[in-house]
Image (cartoon, helix red, strand yellow):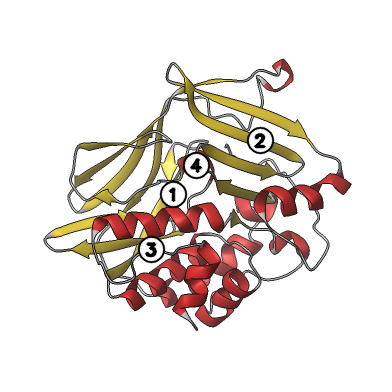
């Protein structure tokens, strides 16, 4: 695996040697704007592989995206290769429908230590829940970013990541009551501990997320990609674009329902994704918002 090929994939041309917060932020932002958060392999009849070499080939060589177990694993490899002190952590995703965190450790995130400070780094949460910059691990501190205000809190060794969102304006009345819209301005995202993990800890959940009827990924084809102003999302046949803070602390959210023949074109033109097998778009009844 070639670190320069990774840099080329994410379009990163800046410092490779400065192991500081500015470089870390730059790497994160380049990756989330180049590598989509997506689960399309499942809906093309192909596996979501966990092996690092396979992940590298999939994302870097084939210019695809992936979910947290893939994109954050790749980011872990890249940061560690650069010399950053990087640790894998495991997270439990909040499920609004049942108002609980997942019982299983289903989310891979990273901790990066720079000097005496530790940061949460995550390139794999997608849509409007995606952080745009590392979050220093300080309990009770707000982190205003372009997408929202993130907040970390810690109690008895368990950390929680939440966000405060803006109001949203949907110009097309047809989509005002879309179940894809997040209805709350305050949103719990996930919990985690600082116990170091390895990719082997996620092998069983990688299978579960692909095969279980209760998995949102098994029931929904999705792809999201951050832009300098917002985020594109494709969920089933529904394409959306959220422009953050387009005016007066309000996000603009635009929707379009695609025909099946339009999806391949939109994946290429908006997400820079070319599929090798036919996609079967799907949007099940699992809870998923943009």
Residue 139 makes an appearance in the image: yes
The numbered disc on residue 14 is: 3
Quarter containing the C terminus = top right
First reached walking from the N terminus: tag 3 or tag 4? 3
Q: Which of the two marks, 2 or 1, is nearer to us in this view?
A: 2
Question: How far apart are the two marked residues, 3 and 4, measured between alpha carbons?
Answer: 18 Å
Question: How far apart are the two marked residues, 2 and 1, measured between alpha carbons?
Answer: 23 Å
Q: Which of the two marks, 2 or 4, is nearer to us in this view?
A: 4
Residue 179 location, quadrant: top right
Q: Residue furthest left?
A: 116
Question: How far apart are the two marked residues, 2 and 4, measured between alpha carbons?
Answer: 16 Å
Q: Secondary structure at mark 1?
A: strand
Badge 3 crowding class, 10 Å Cα cut-off, few under 14, some 14 to 19, many 20 or more, is: few
Q: Which of the two marks, 4 or 1, is nearer to us in this view?
A: 4
The numbered disc on residue 228 is: 4
| Image marks 3 and 1: residues in contact by CB distance under 8 Å | no
Q: Which residue is mark 1?
A: 93
Residue at screen point 35% across, 78% down: 81
Q: Which of the two marks, 3 or 2, is nearer to us in this view?
A: 3
First reached walking from the N terminus: tag 2 or tag 4? 4
Q: Which residue is mark 2?
A: 240
Residue at screen point 37% across, 75% down: 198
User: Total number of numbered labels?
Assistant: 4
Q: Secondary structure at mark 3?
A: loop
């Amino acid at each position: 695996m070639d670190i320069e090929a990774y840099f080329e994939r994410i379009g990163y041309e800046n410092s490779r040697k400065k192991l500081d917060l500015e470089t870390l932020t730059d790497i994160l932002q380049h990756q989330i704007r180049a590598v989509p958060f997506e689960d399309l392999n499942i809906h093309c009849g192909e596996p979501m592989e966990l092996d690092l070499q396979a992940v590298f080939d999939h994302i870097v060589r084939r210019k695809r995206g992936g979910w947290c177990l893939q994109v954050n694993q790749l980011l872990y490899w890249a940061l560690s290769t650069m010399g950053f002190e990087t640790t894998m952590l495991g997270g439990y995703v909040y499920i609004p429908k049942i108002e609980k965190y997942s019982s299983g450790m289903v989310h891979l995130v990273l901790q990066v230590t720079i000097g005496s400070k530790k940061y949460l780094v995550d390139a794999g949460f997608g849509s409007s829940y995606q952080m745009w910059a590392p979050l220093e691990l300080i309990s009770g501190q707000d982190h205003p970013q372009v997408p929202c205000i993130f907040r970390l809190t810690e109690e008895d060794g368990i950390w929680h990541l939440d966000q405060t969102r803006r109001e949203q304006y949907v110009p097309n009345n047809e989509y005002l009551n879309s179940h894809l819209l997040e209805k709350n301005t305050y949103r719990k995202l996930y919990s985690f501990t600082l116990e170091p993990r390895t990719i082997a800890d996620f092998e069983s959940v990688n299978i579960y997320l692909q095969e279980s009827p209760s998995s949102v990924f098994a029931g929904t084809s999705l792809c999201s990609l951050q832009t300098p102003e917002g985020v594109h999302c494709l969920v089933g046949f529904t394409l959306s674009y959220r422009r953050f803070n387009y005016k007066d602390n309000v996000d603009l959210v635009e929707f379009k329902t695609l025909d099946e023949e339009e999806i391949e074109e939109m994946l290429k033109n908006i997400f820079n994704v070319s599929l090798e097998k036919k996609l079967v778009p799907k949007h099940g009844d699992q809870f998923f918002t943009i």
